[in-house]
Amino acid sequence: MNNTTSIEELSVWTTPIFSTQLPDHEYLKDALLDIVYQQKAAQSTAIESLIAPSAKHALHESTLDFLEIQDATIMEVKRTLEELILEVASSLNQAYWPEHTQAEAHIIESWYHVTQTGGYHDTHSHPNCSWCGIYYLEPGEAAVKGKGGVNRFYDPRVNAEHYSDPGTAYLSNQGVWDFLPTEGQVVVFPSYLKHSALPYFGEKDRVVIAFNSAIDLY
């Protein structure tokens, strides 16, 4: 008789994060950067959104409608990002949606960050949306050791670090996960997930387009 106990692992309350490369990034990049820097030159203040300016240092942020600009390149990027969001949302939620319904993803807020050396964004999350994303249009020198500029995500399990011993080593003890960006990459994550942009020390600008989205059924 086999007396070995069968133990089943149940993974619950996981946090899905998705990463991909934006199609045609190499063809879109220069035109997008031109628009970003035209908008930046016209800004009357560094943080045009006027949202939490004290949480942002040495960076420029647009108003929250950047991807609403009526430009062919911008419209193509928005369409592509909405298709990506819909694919992500459908993969996780379709089993919970009513039968015979169609879903649409809508980017409801979007903005750019142009970060100079020494720039950072404190820890925050994004309310009033379901999925958020960051498109690394130009990550600058973030891939160079010591230059910083990574996005840090924080463990959403509030009490995960209330006690530490060898039995909790799988929690990594830090409660954070650092995402090293590459050019053209898009990372999509749930809106409740707190994150920050760590201080960046590259000489080249770090340029990203960030967005919030919502899903509708019809």
Image (cartoon, helix red, strand yellow):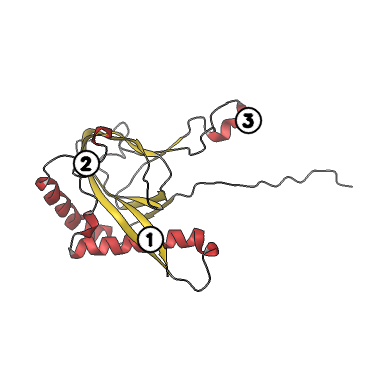
User: In screen coordinates, is 50 left or right of 93?
Assistant: left
Q: Are marks 1 and 3 in contact (CB under 8 Å)?
A: no
Label 3 and label 2: CA atoms lie apart by 45 Å
Q: Quadrant of residue 215?
A: bottom left
Label 1 and label 3: CA atoms lie apart by 38 Å
Residue at 38 percent of width and 60 percent of height = 84
**What residue is shown with label 2?**
50
Outermost residue, right side: 1
Q: Are marks 3 and 2 in contact (CB under 8 Å)?
A: no
Viewer can see residue 201: no
Q: Earlier in the sequence, mark 1 or mark 2?
A: 2
Residue 174: x and y in percent read 48, 30
Residue 138: x and y in percent read 24, 47
Quarter of the image with the C terminus in it: bottom left
**What residue is shown with label 1?**
84
Q: Identity of the amino acid at label 1?
A: Leu
Using the image, tell me which numbered label, if any, was put on residue 167. Answer: 3
